[in-house]
């Protein structure tokens, strides 16, 4: 078995674990959000969304880009200077501990000043409560990044994806049952982050990923900071792309509209689930290929992973894009049905982000972090400008258009830069066949004006559609040898017999 197949199988196994954890995490998060949205009025739910938006921006500043930079640097140090790995880990931990504590203090002090900006008196008290979760949240993410640098996914799966969201859900149920209101929900949020961090810290010490005695090395801190700083700025710009719509809806309109929009936005953000799951182990594995100047093999991995990511994401996109009203009302209730058109627009933007593959992570692998920064800068600039122009006229649909456009701009730039530097692109012949077939079938569905009034009706239509799509993909002979090898890896991992499936695929190669 060649190196590409071994790398693909390792990524696939890791992707399966991360994906399962992500699905569980999103299911818990969705159930929690739905519970909060149904127990509060739309204005209070809007305040909840605004508070988390500001907290997420604070998290990006507090992490200093290390959540994305640390796995790559650990992978490099393990090969070149393994004796410095413990010092690298402890230096990163101390940097984020200091940065997150400072950021939390700034949020607490700045909370009263944010109230008049968003015309919302409930915002300062919720921000003061939520800010206390920031150091624990940031340090948990650093510990997960350390385990990722060591090629492990268990810490992300068990602790970040399951333990913390589950604790938050349980505490939220108690807060709703005891009628503690919005403040009670945020206290639940803080306690869940503290508990998750303590459990993860214990596990990290047990695995000896974190030294028993923390040391700070200024030279390592400088190196980490210089590499990760563009990633931090990229992350800030990414959050501008993701959250400017929420913030500017609060500024131009009101919390009620923010609550309505934030029924559509979390659903659309489900679309990159397979992309992000695959990317968890892609960076350390692709870094090893790049370090050996094996760009041809790296390109092959990129194309195959992108094709599988699209194939898995497509049914989810179809559900949101063709049946947006049923999708929203199923999760959030009839009072949020007005966000259906916004969901369609957002889904199109996030699907474009997904179909171009792991372009941003590949730029990180080849050391072109500034390219991500430049791409996100122009996209964020476009997002802000479009929100200013479109929200006063079109409301939540204008906000959705601005966000979708910014993701399209950013991904075109990243993919163009990656191709110029390495020749890597996602468009193999098999992938073009899959894309054209999927787009054609969506056009047919829209022209035929297929509709359903219940989620069960929608699922029935989707099953028929997906089966037809897979048959067409097979008939177009878009199966490649690596697809068969990936199924063999699934057989070995889970002990299932897929010989019949492999035989069918072999006939259509």
Image: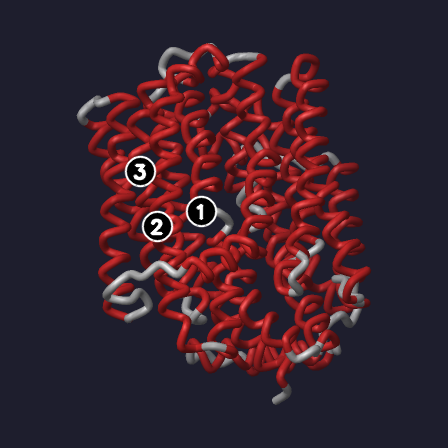
Nearest the viewer among 26 and 115 is: 115
Left or right of 330 in this view: 139: left
Q: Nearer the viewer, residue 81 or 313?
A: 81
Along the line of sight, which residue is nearer the eye, 500 or 422?
422
Q: To which residue does mark 2 refer?
A: 139
Looking at the image, is mark 3 or mark 1 nearer the viewer? Answer: 1
Horizontal and vertical percent position of residue 380: 66, 34
Could one spot residue 504 in this view of the protein?
A: no
What is the spatial separation of the Cα atoms under label 2 and label 1, in whole angstroms?
8 Å
Relative vertical location of residue 430 with respect to residue 350 in this rendering, above or below: below
Compare marks 3 and 2 and give the one earlier in the sequence: 3
**Quadrant the C terminus occupies:** bottom right
Which residue reaches farthest bottom? 1
Q: As drawn, which residue projects farthest toward the front?
A: 218
| Mark 2 closeness class: few <14, some 14–19, many ≥20 residues within 10 Å | many
In the rendered image, which residue does mark 1 sit on?
63
Residue 119 seen from this side = yes
The quarter of the picture where residue 472 lies is bottom right
Mark 2 touching mark 1, by CB under 8 A? no
- Relative to 325, say whether 207 is above or below: below
Quadrant containing the N terminus is: bottom right
Please name the residue that numbered disc 3 is placed on: 133
10 Å neighbourhood of mark 1: few (<14), some, or many (≥20)?
many
> How far across and down, in percent of the image, does residue 184 sit?
24, 26
Q: Position of residue 25 (x, y in %)?
A: 39, 49
Which residue is pictured at 72% across the width and 51% down the height?
414
């Amino acid at each position: 078995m060649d190196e590409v197949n071994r790398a693909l199988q390792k990524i696939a196994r890791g992707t399966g674990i991360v994906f399962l954890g992500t699905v569980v995490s999103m299911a818990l998060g969705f159930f929690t959000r739905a519970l909060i949205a149904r127990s509060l009025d739309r204005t209070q739910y809007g305040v909840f969304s605004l508070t988390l938006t500001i907290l997420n921006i604070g998290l990006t500043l507090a992490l200093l880009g290390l959540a994305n930079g640390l796995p790559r640097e650990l992978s490099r140090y393990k090969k070149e200077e393994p004796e410095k790995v413990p010092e690298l880990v402890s230096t990163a931990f101390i940097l984020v501990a200091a940065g997150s504590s400072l950021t939390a203090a700034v949020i607490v002090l700045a909370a009263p000043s944010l109230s008049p900006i968003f015309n919302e008196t409930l915002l300062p008290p919720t921000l003061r409560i939520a800010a206390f979760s920031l150091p624990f949240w940031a340090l948990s993410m650093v510990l997960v990044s350390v385990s990722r640098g060591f090629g492990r996914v268990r810490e992300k799966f068990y602790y970040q994806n399951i333990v913390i969201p589950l604790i938050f859900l349980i505490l939220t149920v108690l807060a709703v049952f005891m009628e503690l209101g919005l403040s009670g929900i945020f206290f639940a949020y803080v306690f869940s982050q503290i508990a998750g961090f303590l459990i993860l810290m214990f596990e990290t010490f047990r695995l000896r990923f974190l030294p028993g005695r923390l040391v700070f090395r200024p030279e390592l801190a400088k190196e980490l900071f210089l590499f990760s700083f563009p990633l931090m700025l990229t992350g800030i710009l990414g959050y501008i792309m993701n959250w400017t719509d929420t913030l500017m809806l609060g500024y131009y309109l009101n919390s009620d509209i923010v609550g309505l929009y934030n029924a559509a936005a979390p659903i659309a953000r489900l679309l990159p689930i397979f992309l992000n799951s695959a990317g968890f182990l892609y960076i350390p594995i692709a870094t090893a290929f790049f370090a050996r100047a094996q760009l041809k093999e790296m390109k092959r991995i990129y194309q195959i992973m992108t094709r599988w990511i699209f194939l898995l994401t497509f049914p989810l996109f179809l559900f949101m894009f063709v049946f947006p009203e049923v999708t929203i009302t199923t999760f959030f209730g009839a009072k949020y049905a007005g966000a259906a058109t916004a969901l369609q627009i957002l889904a199109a933007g996030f699907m474009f982000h997904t179909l171009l593959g792991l372009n941003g992570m590949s730029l990180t692998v080849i050391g072109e972090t500034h390219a991500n920064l430049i791409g996100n800068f122009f996209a964020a600039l476009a997002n802000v400008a479009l929100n200013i122009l479109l929200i006063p006229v079109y409301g939540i649909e204008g906000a959705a258009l601005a966000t979708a456009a910014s993701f399209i701009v950013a991904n075109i730039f990243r993919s163009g830069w990656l191709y110029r530097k390495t020749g890597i692109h996602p468009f193999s012949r098999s992938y073009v066949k899959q894309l054209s077939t999927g787009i054609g079938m969506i056009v047919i569905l829209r022209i035929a004006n297929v509709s359903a009034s219940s989620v069960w009706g929608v699922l029935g239509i989707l099953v028929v559609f997906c089966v037809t799509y897979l048959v067409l993909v097979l008939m177009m002979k878009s199966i490649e040898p690596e697809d068969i090898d990936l199924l063999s890896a699934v057989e070995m991992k889970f002990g299932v017999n897929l010989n019949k499936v492999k035989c069918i695929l072999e006939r259509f190669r």
